[in-house]
Amino acid sequence: MIHRGTLALRYTIGRGALNIRYCQRRWAQVHDVRFLATHQQPDKIAEKYREKLQEKAKALRLKDVDELKTVYKDRIQAQKKSASLVNPNSPFPPPPPPPQATQRTQPTPIPEATSDKLSTPPGIKLLSSFIDVPKTLELPQKEIEYIWRLRHASDPRSLCAVIPQATYSRIEATAKRHPQFILPLPREGQGAEIHFLQWTFTTPTTATVLFTHLAEFKMRGEFSQPHTTVTHHLDLAEPKGLVLLQGTVVDGRGMTVDEGKWLLMCLQKFYGGGEEKVERKKLLEQFSQGDGDFKVEELLEEAEKIV
């Protein structure tokens, strides 16, 4: 539902997808117990245990602590040597051995892509999923258009069209400059409902448009679910001068097929599918730049024009 309080719409969209979380980091230092046990100052250790050492020397009928050290000299050296070795029960892993200069590791070979499926993003179908492309290339344009429409006639939720290459080239050029935009959907007695669209060029032979309710996009950002998906297939653009369009209006997401067709028609109006209009070009530029002069009322007025 549109009202006149939506002048800051671009800023809301631009920031709706970002949820900044502040994380508190806890810095801690972990020391090897063996290091602390063997690298303290000897004088401090002797001072700490001087009374016990004196008692030990007296029990052995020795003159003082220095004489006790002399008696236990060999045992002390042996103890120091064993302390420098890695304790098998220590929780700290031993340091890795130094690399051998003579050893050369071979890089792991990267497997080559053997099919289009490896490079196709999830949810995107190539033209070969619908028709036999090599055989279709042998047909004239009229037959290709007929076969394409017939291919989707049995699906009540599908959208399809055949676009001349020259027309699509204008649309694509505009889409790359303005990959995001909003379109109005008039509701009788309720004003209009705003929908967010986004272009994605996921493969060299496909260009996809995702339509989402603006309210959902503002709330969920990149995690929002599109209600309509439209893909342009470019496989026949050069050899036959045709771009085949295929789309789906998802059931249960508040959109009818006729409403999906309306949005698709509006997309072609604003992106150059027909005669270029200065007012529509201005709205695209204002939206992309986040211009505060962008007005939804003007958007609705241009969308409702027949041409």
Image (tube, grey):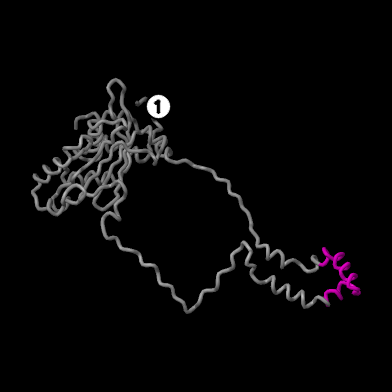
User: Which segment did they paint magenta?
Assistant: 46-70
Residue assigned mark 1: 5
* Residue found at x 33% / y 63%: 111
Q: Quadrant of the N terminus?
A: top left
Relative placement, left or right, of 87 versus 250 is right
Position in image of residue 20 (x %, y %): 49, 42
Position in image of residue 46 (x %, y %): 82, 67
Is 69 within the magenta?
A: yes
Position in image of residue 277 (x %, y %): 23, 36
* Residue found at x 20% / y 37%: 155
In which quadrant of the rendered view does residue 80 lie? bottom right
Outermost residue, bottom side: 102
Is 130 within the magenta?
A: no
Predominant SS of the magenta segment: helix
Q: Out of 9 and 152, give the one closest to the viewer.
A: 152
Q: Amino acid at mark 1?
A: Gly
Q: Out of 6 and 82, give the one closest to the viewer.
A: 82
Relative placement, left or right, of 94 versus 134 is right
In which quadrant of the rendered view does residue 156 lie? top left
